[in-house]
Image (cartoon, rainbow, N blue to C red):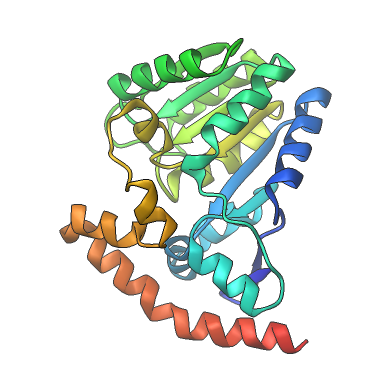
Amino acid sequence: MYFECQGRRIAVNTPARARLEAEISARFSAGQGFALATLNLDHLVKMEASAAFLSAYQAQDLVVADGRPIVWLSRLARRPVELMPGSDMVLPLSRLAAEAGVPVVLAGSTEEALNDAEAALTATVPGLEIAWIHAPSGRFDPDGDEADQILHRLDETGPCLCFLALGAPKQEQFAQRGRKQAPAAGFASVGAGLDFLGGHQKRAPSWVRAIAMEWLWRALSSPGRLLPRYAKCLAILPGLALAAWRIRDR
């Protein structure tokens, strides 16, 4: 399944969880890095407005579907993909890392949230090694000096899994740089996944997620910030549905 932004294609190139886990396990075994991004409507909105974000997304090795609209559109196009939100990937990827003996790095959010996420991960995933954590100071710039320092330390760490909780587009742009400057590291952009894990943000209850209303739950929890974002997402849906129908016809 693919989407077009600024005349360029963004493909959900890893449609199933089993395929994602097999690919990441193989890369861990080979000591190869990767960049994993989780595509949703908000990202498509941002990519249409930002060539830099679009470029960062095209540099990702693995792209999965984060958000039911992406899944629904893929079904409309007869190119079905599974739902794999970034926040749901933290524990499964950590288990793969533990099985492969690959250390994990947590970057983003706040120091308190990362400490709590570290405690939750080590309590839940036997044998997991947290190599180090880093909470950026101030307004993190993925092209700045602090990013250089993190990438240098990741390169020294060697093969590892780095969870990025920096928000879009910063985490994807940072991962784009990381693929060149710390090529043995695996970067997984998980947004609020570490905050959820450590209890610093409350996720919608499972029954709300089951009826595909997590977006409404989040919007009502922070309407001033999220309602305008979701309005932009809804505005692009008709055009995306038409494009998916055209893919179906092909």
Q: Residue at x 20, y 52 (%)?
A: 221
Image quadrant assignment for residue 175: top right
Q: Toward which corner of the image does residue 228 lie, by quadrant?
A: bottom left
Instruction: Estimate the x, y position of residue 174 in percent, counting from the top left.
Output: 52, 39
Drawn side of residue 67 relative to residue 136, left or right: right
* Residue at 71 percent of width and 26 percent of height: 184
User: Residue at the front extreme?
Assistant: 207
Quarter of the image for the C terminus: give it.
Answer: bottom right
Q: Which of these two is toward me, 180 or 210?
A: 210
Q: Residue furthest left?
A: 224
Q: Nearer the viewer, residue 115 or 59?
A: 115
Q: Position of residue 116 (x, y in %)?
A: 34, 19
The number of numbered discs placed on residues in the rendered structure image is 0
State the image coordinates of residue 242 (x, y, percent, origin top left): 57, 88
- Can residue 4 be seen here? no
> In the picture shown, does residue 55 fall above or below 203?
below
123 up-or-down from 170: above or below: above
Q: Residue at x 52, y 46 (%)?
A: 172
Quarter of the image containing the N terminus?
bottom right
In the rendered structure, the answer to whether residue 129 lies left or right of residue 48 reads: right
Residue 198: image quadrant is top left
Estimate the x, y position of residue 7 in percent, counting from the top left. Answer: 62, 77
Q: Nearer the viewer, residue 192 or 111?
A: 192
Q: Residue at x 62, y 43 (%)?
A: 36
Judge from the rendering whether residue 184 lies leftward or rightward of residue 135; answer left or right: right
Say whether residue 121 is visible.
Answer: yes
- Check the image and report above or below for 60 versus 142: below
Q: Is residue 45 above or below residue 162?
A: below
